[in-house]
Amino acid sequence: MKTILKTVDLKMTYQLGKVSVNALRGINLEVKEGEFVAIMGPSGCGKSTLLHILGAMLKPSSGQVLIDGEDISKMNEAARTEVRRRKIGFVFQKFNLFPTLTTEGNIKLAENIRRNGASKTSAKRDEILKLLNLEKRLHHKPIEMSGGEQQRVAIARALVSSPAIILADEPTGNLDSENSQIVLNMLQKLNQQLGQTIIMITHNSEAAAVAQQTVYMKDGQIVQ
Amino acid sequence: MMDNSLVATNVRQRPLRTLISVVGVALGVVLIVLVVGLSRGMLKEQGRRNSNVGAEIIFRRPGAVSFTSNFGLSLPIQYAQRLSTIEGIENVSPVGQYLKPSDQGFGAELIDGIEYESYAKVSNIRIVKGKSFSTGNEVIVDPTYVKNRKVKLGDSIELFGKKFTITGIYEPEIGSRIKMNLSLMQSILNAQDRATFVLVKCKTNFTEQNVAAEINQQLPGNQLLFVRDLQELYEKGSSALNTFLSVIIVISIVISTLVIMLAMYTTITERTREIGILKSLGAPKRFIIVTIEKEALLISLLGIVFGYVVALAGRFLITYYTPLFIDIETKWMLVAGLCGIVSGFFGALYPALRAANQDPIKAISYE
């Protein structure tokens, strides 16, 4: 299978006043297309920093990040934004939906940003909405939906542009156990049925269990 | 493609912010439309009244920048006697003008000091009710003055700090609405034997150009205005007035721009997390800037429409309840609208640039 994401000796150092904090100390990670990878580790181990770098939101101090063959580690902000637009789909712990927009509005906004053809995206949107069981929530605003439904809308929004990778940051962190299970099942279904590559950060070992591979981090390094 | 639904819902979602911004833009539009309309309306009306005065030429001393700014008694009245001897001139009438603050608390009011007999010969003025003024504290007024001020013959009005009795109503409505004895005005203003200008009526078989040339030859160095040009002169306004109007336009743009800037800046701060979401979706800076600018321009358009409605309602009320004239021209409506658009664009520019340049991680983590 094709390698969709690869990091080579990835390092990230934050400068906090006169103190340097090494958030990542040489991460080497390889994810194949269609894989579902969970990243676990204690707070402060560098999981979020890694996710931000993989999502082209943050430039690493050194090392390489190859996404679908493109090295984003040396790119400027505009080029990284372009990569994010074309190849990355984010799912956040706090859903991060636009509160003023309906399910349809949130998804269409993502489509507009990603400039996909209307007919194609409409068919794709319908397929995703059906898959995520959101057809009846199309005209509801986030405030009118449960946390689980909101997270499914966030997943639909991430999926609609067919990203190379979905980066999920604690997607069940704000959900009760029932909704957590629904969301995890959805992610697993997307991975298995659509072959969607997913990298998920989680504290929850039950959540990590749905992934095909679990990576453990400690003190800015992959330990297992 | 930019997302219009996000723009529309943001405008609806924050009604107070939208209302304040709309009022801010509307304020600028109203300021321009009403102040320009009032200034130009009053001038046009004055121009119309003066151009119907019946004379062909206005003779006055040099030095005034424009006709509209020349008030006060500076012309020796001997000029009137001298003019009457020039060939081609049928009648002359010296007029004194005094500008006083309106007793309605808004604007100013012009008073004519005239010699009734000579003025009547030049202008065909006639008393339609009552009688002309005497040398005492008496005035004549026109029908519009009577209607607007709700006065009648025998009532008193205050001029120069004294009570004046209305003794007559004159027609046609020419020159100032209040006319009094020129000698009395000279005495009150301590300007004996002086006037503001002299109205010159030409004989029928003499053209005003020929008469003007003769006047220039015999009394060189003075200013001659053809009455037929007055309307246009008034409509152009004086350079001082045009400067004033420019200042009003600049002030209105500044007010509207500041209101939009403050409102958009506050909104952008409130929506930091949403900016972060857009960035996480891969929205380029241009998308964020254009989205915010579109929101500001939508607010500006609402403000412009609201401003037009308020300005038109204001004109109706002002002209209904006061003697003021407001001339709302399409050109100035468009200028006011353009100012609203410019304010919206530039007011939102800094907040939009600031939003577009936010760090995506900090923005999306904003609580």
Image (tube, coloured by chain):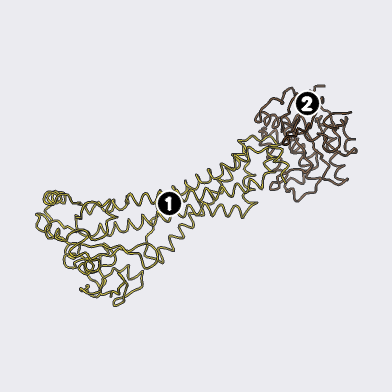
Q: Amino acid at mark 1?
A: Ile
Q: In the visual, does B164 lie left or right of A26?
A: left
Q: In the visual, does B70 lie left or right of B265?
A: left
Tell me which chain appears brown: A
Q: Which residue is mark 2?
A: A10
Chain of the residue under the numbered disc 2 shown in the image: A
Q: Are marks 2 and 1 on the same chain?
A: no
- Tell me where residue B153 appears, x and y as whole percent: 29, 76
Mark 2, residues whose alpha carbon is within 10 Å: few (<14), some, or many (≥20)? many
- Tell me where residue B99 appears, x and y as whole percent: 30, 62
Q: Residue at x 86, y 47 (%)?
A: A176
Q: Secondary structure at mark 2?
A: strand
Viewer-proximal residue among A185 and B352: B352
Tell me which chain appears yellow: B
Viewer-proximal residue among A182 and B101: B101
Q: Which residue is mark 1?
A: B248
